[in-house]
Structures are given as structure tokens and as C-alpha cells.
Image (spheres, rainbow, N blue to C red):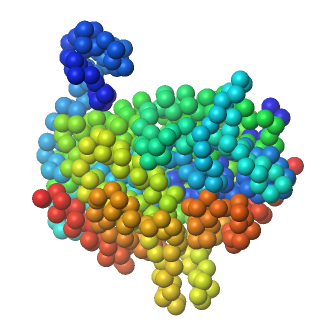
Amino acid sequence: KQWYQRRVRAGKGGVGKSTTVAVLAGTLASSGLSVGVLDADLCGPSLSRMIGLKGSIHSCEQGWLPLSASVGKGRISAVSLSFLVENQDEAVIWRGPKKTAMIKQFLSDVCWGALDYLLIDTPPGTSDEHMTIMEAIPNCSVVLVTSPQAVAAADVLRQVTFCKKTNANVLGIIETMSGFVCPNCSDCGLLFGKGGGKRLAEYCNIEFLGYVPIDPNLSRLLDRGELFKNFQSSASIQSYTEITKKLIKP
Amino acid sequence: MIEPENVPDSCPGPSSEGAGQMDGCAGCPNKQACSTGQFRTDTSPAEVLASLQCVRNKIVVLSGKGGVGKSTVTAQIARGLAALDLSVGVVDVDVCGPSLARILGVNGQSVHKSAAGWSPVYTLDDIAVMSIDFLLSSEEDAVIWRGAKKNGMIKDFLSSVDWGELDYLVIDTPPGTSDEHLAIVSLLKQAKITGTVLVTTPQEVSLGDVRKEINFCRKLRLPVIGLVENMARYECPKCRTVSEIFPATSGGAQALADSEGMPLICSIPVCPQVGQSGDNGVEGLDIPTEYGILVEQVIRFCDG
């Protein structure tokens, strides 16, 4: 296939993988690129809410059609289990084999069209979903996300081992939730510490892509699916823009 | 293996001798599964019951969402109970991301096996801990396992550990509603889960996932102690301004608790000392008092 495939991963939950995918997708699309987004987190498919896409997936002769929207000069097309279920509050209580089958379908049965990038969001861990993706797309590149804490970095270190074992091309590590600037006095509070992601990158000899600060405004936009309407308004977006430049450099 | 619930009235019982092969099985979607006998042969719940017969209360900490603080909450519940001189064990069934051992300061230790089973690792405050962390030779080891293998490990944690007599066994889970969660429910079918604690953060992205978890609990008829909202607010140490780090765009955990008809036990602020002490595996000095409220509620629920 002609497009570049990137996968956003962490070992750890709640560090900002889906946020990173949403913002990276928006940054790339805004500049005129066609970006596909695949949410492989079947039990907790947050991505569709964050990018503001809702609805049901339709089929054509060749397979499933992703939902898509114009973003800036480009386009985002997305596939998520949330487009296939009616009741969004219903738990998806699936064991490994069923999750594996669904992800395989997402990878083989979706008519993505011509894409510049396909970004794949994954759940935390190193299990069925991750193994399935690596087997299906052995040449994909990986972006690792961690928060600053040692507890998070420890999980991501295991993720690095997984990447080594599967010969994945790791592009770098992003440290999210790195500092919070008080809106009143501008004191920078290190709510979850700082530097854990950078130290992990140095330890593993992986490129450190950058810090992203805690940004309540971004959280608000993602909750409301309004990210792409107000793309430049959040402080953390600037950090992600710098990270994106590093990721797409030839 | 969980027996199917969507059975017709004529069902002979998934674990019966003729399961899947009787007249009453015609048209049932589980016919094929039942006829393989898979619901008949699982003795795991009985083994777990025997192993946990001296464990008074089993608490499961859940969230649909990752990174909301399940392991931190598990550790704080355990420490709070231990501080009241109750005997406590914790088991981490997040086999891919076992954070609990580090938070409790016992990561990197080894377990020993005897005729009575594996001996758990004890913390300084006498909490018995079982985690895959103790079975890994290095902190870089990744547990790259599919669901079935994870289930096998979880079964060992519940049936092959010499827990001894415990007032409480607190079980930390990974996010989601998948193999690990089904394993816990199935394995504790006879031993019985005493109560579950659901953890969320205020933003809708979290609440959406936790709603799914609540439906999971409902579907599987798990007793729910209540909801805990974590990282609810942050007070600047310099100017005391309180900020919402993850703004509650849809009413936060209180709105969720109200709509689901369950108590919001407490709303815990972001406390950097909690994170730091978790990273260092020590007991924090300035822990939010909300954790005390949580421990009291757990005890009240279990004793009630």
C-alpha cells in the first residue's frame, strides 16, 4: 500500500494515546493530507468522540466505508467499533479471539481509498490487539506515549520490549501530562512529575519526541468532539505540532 | 468459562450431560458451544472457592477507562484497611501492565512455591501481594500473551496462592471488559465477589467508558459499592487556585452516579504526593482524606 502506517501505543492506560492520535490526525489533515484513523481499542473506543465523528458505517461492494470529515485542507477517515454498535453505553464483552477477528476485519475490509497516513490507536497492554496488528502490518511504525510517572514508564518499557521482539520501527516517545501551568499565578505544577518519558527514551536509545503539558482546554474540546473546530486554540496543540514535524521528517 | 445467559426456557442447562444435544436445544444460539461440553468441565470456580475459603471479603476495583487510578485506589484501599489492623491481600490481574507491586514498594521481588502454593510477597505494612511482576526476571520483560494464557495466570493467582486468613482481598484489574474481567467473574462464581469499586475521572471520555463497565457489572450481576471520582481537581500550592484538570463537561462522576442510581463515594483531588509515593513505592504522607472515606465505605458495605 502507498501509505505510511503509524501506530500509537503505550503499555499504560490513560496516558493520552487516543488524544495523541486525534491531535496528530488533525495536524496532518490540516496541512492538506488525507489521514485514516483506526481505533483498535474495542472495549473503550474513545477516538470517535474525540474527533467528533458519529454514525453508522456503510458498506460498498469492496467493503466498509469509513466515516470521514474535512479538516483544514485535508481529510480524516475513521473506523471504530462505536460506528458499528447501536447502544454506545453497552459493554463490549469480547474475549481475545473475537477482538482479533474484528481488528482483522478493520484492517482488511475497509475501503480507505488513497491515504497519506493511517494512524492506529491501541488499548493499553501487549495482548491480542497488539499482536494482531503487528502480524497484519509488520512494517508499521510505532509512536510510544507515556506520562511522566515511573509507574507509566515501567509499562512503556515493556512495550519497548514488545516492539523489539516484533521488529517494529519505533519512531520515538512522547511524554504527556508533563506539567500544568496555573491559570492564575502561572506556577508550573508537576502533577505527575516530569522527565520520566525523556529518561525512558534515553535508557532505550529511542528518540524523545517532546513534552506535552496538561491542557484542560484540550480535554474539554475532546469531550465535546470539537477539536477540529478550534484546533489552534489549545496550548498543547503547539507541542503536538512540533512533534508532528519530527514524525514526518523524511 | 461463563455459562451463556441467553438460554431458551427449554434449556436443559449448559452444564448438564445432554447440553446442546437435547430437543430443547433446537434453535438455541449456544447449541454448538454446549455440545462441546465446555460448560461442563470447568472446576476452576470450585478450586478458587477452596483456596479463598479463609478470605472474608473479595473486592474488585474496575474501570472501563485506563489511567484513572485503579491501581492507586487499590493500593490506598489496602493500606487503609491494613492501618485498621485488618489482614489484607491484593492481587493484580493486569498481567500486561502490573503497576501494583511498584506502588506498594515490592516490585522486583520473587515468590516461592511450597506444598501450600505460592507464598505472596508481604509489604512493610503486612499486605500480601500477588502480581506477575514477581514472576518476571526483569523490568523489561513484556507479557505478550493472548487472552487464554492470561486467564490461566489469573486462575493461578486465585487458586494457587497461599493467602491464609484474610479479612479483605482486593483485586486490581486492567481497563476494559474483556478476558481478565470475565475470568475474575467466572473464577469467583462460587467464592463470590463481595463488592466492586468503579473508578473514573471527571471528563466524558472517561465516563463513557465507565458507563460500559457499569453495564458489564449489571449484566453479570456484580454488587457495586459505588463510584470513585479521581483527579477531580488540582489546588495550586502557591496561590491555592483550584483548577479542573479534566473538566467535567457532562456533570462529572456525580451526574453518572445519579443516572446509574449508585453512590458517588468520594471525589479525590490530584495530589502529586500520591503519584510520587506510588512511583517510589512508599506510603504517602499527605494523602487526600477522601481515601479514608473510601475505606470506611468499603468496610460499611462489606459488614452490611
Residue B5, located in which quarter of the rendered image? Answer: top left
Residue B82 x/y as whole percent: 22, 64
Residue A243, located in which quarter of the rendered image? Answer: bottom right
- What residue sits 71% from the left and 66% below the top? A230
In the foreground, B45 or A62 = A62
Residue B179 x/y as whole percent: 41, 36
A148 left or right of B34 in image: right
Q: Is residue A67 visible?
A: yes
In the foreground, B14 or B184 = B14
- What residue sits 59% from the left and 33% below the top? A103
Q: Is residue B156 visible?
A: no
- What residue sits 25% from the left and 30% below the top? B44
Task: Check the picture and name the quadrant holding the N terminus of chain B.
Answer: top left
Residue B284 x/y as whole percent: 37, 73
- What residue sits 41% from the left and 52% below the top? B211
A103 left or right of A86 in image: right
